[in-house]
Image (spheres, rainbow, N blue to C red):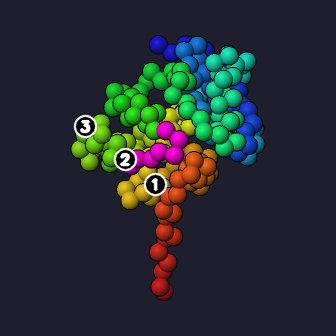
Amino acid sequence: MRSAIEHFTVFETAAGYCGIAWSDAGVTRFHLPEKDAASAERSIRRRVPGVEPGEPSQAVEGTIALARRYFSGERIDFTAVALDLPTMDDLFRSIFAATRQLGWGETTSYGVMAKALGHGPEVARDVGQAMAKNPVPLIIPCHRVLAAGGRPGGFSAPGGVNTKLMMLEMEGVKVATPLPAQQSLF
């Protein structure tokens, strides 16, 4: 059960300012880089009502250090980071557990993940929804889950798909860029 009190802090990385929120049980929210600390703080406060600034525990400090190293280009594994995500349903839990197993530079698609979890192609949409609702991107590396054909698909983090592409490029992954919208002939 989630602790009634959640805390947060904002910290700087080579890619910008990130935010992290936590309870006594683990990380509850991670916010990918913004251009300034105030934007990162606003986003955390908007997504975690009642959250208060706090002094990170040793475990949270360790997660912050990992994030800084990641955004400096170092190959990092976040699978040991304790999470506190009790409101997820069983399908989302299984999707997030599978996503956490994707290593540096490893990608999959929504459909392949659905099949790997023992579901049909109709669950690919649920995989996409789970990625869009991921409260701890980077720790659960949703940027490594692509649309069919190796296309980037969507990304709801700050900077949208450009952030996803930047993170994948840092990991050595080349992704097919989306085609521009069709222009009118008239």
Is 58 a magenta residue? Answer: no
Residue under pointer 2: 110
Residue at image position (28%, 43%) is 115
Q: How many marks?
A: 3
Pick whichever, 143 or 37, lies toward us.
143
Residue at image position (32%, 48%) is 111
**Spatial CA span between label 3 and label 2:** 13 Å
Quarter of the view holding residue 92: top left
Residue at image position (50%, 58%) is 175
**Spatial CA span between label 1 and label 3:** 22 Å
**Cβ atoms under marks 3 and 2 closer than 8 Å:** no
Q: Position of residue 132 (x, y in %)?
A: 47, 42
**Spatial CA span between label 1 and label 2:** 10 Å
Task: Answer left or right for 148 relative to 140.
Answer: left
Q: Badge 3 local density, few (<14 within 10 Å), some, or many (20+)? A: few
Pick whichever, 106 or 63, lies toward us.
106
Q: Earlier in the sequence, mark 1 or mark 2?
A: 2
The circle on residue 153 is 1
Considering only vertical position in the picture, is 99 above or below 79? Answer: below
Q: Position of residue 31 (x, y in %)?
A: 62, 36
Main SS of the magenta segment?
loop
Three-letter code for the amino acid on which mark 2 is drawn? Tyr
Three-letter code for the amino acid on which mark 1 is drawn? Gly
In the rendered structure, which segment of residues is drawn in magenta?
Answer: 103-109
The circle on residue 117 is none
Three-letter code for the amino acid on which mark 3 is drawn? Gly
The circle on residue 118 is 3
Task: Answer left or right for 178 relative to 46.
Answer: left
